[in-house]
Image (cartoon, helix red, strand yellow):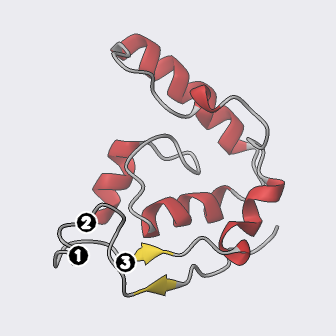
Amino acid sequence: MPQALPARRVACPRPGGRGGRGGAGDAPFVVPTLETWAWQSVAACRGMDSSVFFAPPDERSEAKHSREAAARRVCARCPVREACADFALRSHETYGVWGGLTEKERARGRR
C-alpha cells in the first residue's frame, strides 16, 4: 500500500480570507504539490462521478444515507483510504466523503 506523503504547509491565508490575514483558528493553507496529491493516482474513486462522494443541494436524509453508503463501499476497497482520510482531516475538508469518513465524522475527529 502506498504511504501518505506529508502535505507542505505555508504561512499564507486561505484564498478569500479576511484582509489577507488568517484568523487564529484558520488551518494553514495546503500547497497543492505533486507529492501532496500522488496518492490520488491509485485511488479506487479515480475517474468516478464525484456525485457519489459530494451531496447535491437539497439532498434528503434517505438519499444522503444511500449515497454515503455507496461512497463507503468504494472507499472500503481503496488502497489509499487512510491517506485520503488523513488528507481530508489535515486540510479541514468540510464537504464530501473522504477515505470513508463523512463531513460529520471528520468534524467530530477535529474536536
How many discs mark residues in the rendered view?
Answer: 3
Mark with earlier residue (3, 2): 2
Nearest the eye: 59 or 34: 34
The amino acid type, in three-letter code, at marker 2 is Gly
Percent x, y of residue 4: 68, 74
Check the picture and name the quadrant holding the C terminus: bottom left
Nearest the eye: 22 or 70: 22
Residue drawn where x is 78% and y is 44% of the image = 44
Mark 1 against mark 3, which lies toward the viewer? Answer: 1
Residue projecting furthest to the front? 19
Discs 3, 2 touching: Cβ within 8 Å: no
Mark 1 neighbour class, 10 Å CA radius: few under 14, some 14 to 19, many 20 or more = some
Discs 2, 1 touching: Cβ within 8 Å: yes
**Secondary structure state at the residue bearing disc 1:** loop
Nearest the eye: 16 or 97: 16
Residue drawn where x is 16% and y is 79% of the image = 24
Residue occupied by mark 1: 22
The amino acid type, in three-letter code, at marker 1 is Gly
Discs 1, 3 touching: Cβ within 8 Å: yes
Mark 2 neighbour class, 10 Å CA radius: few under 14, some 14 to 19, many 20 or more = few
Mark with earlier residue (1, 3): 1
Say whether residue 51 is left or right of residue 105. Answer: right
Check the picture and name the quadrant holding the N terminus: bottom right
Residue occupied by mark 3: 28
Spatial distance from mark 2 to mark 1, Cα to Cα? 6 Å
**Secondary structure state at the residue bearing disc 2:** loop
Residue 41 position by quadrant? bottom right
Residue drawn where x is 47% and y is 40% of the image = 96
Mark with earlier residue (2, 1): 2
Percent x, y of residue 27: 32, 73
Residue occupied by mark 2: 17
Percent x, y of residue 94: 37, 49
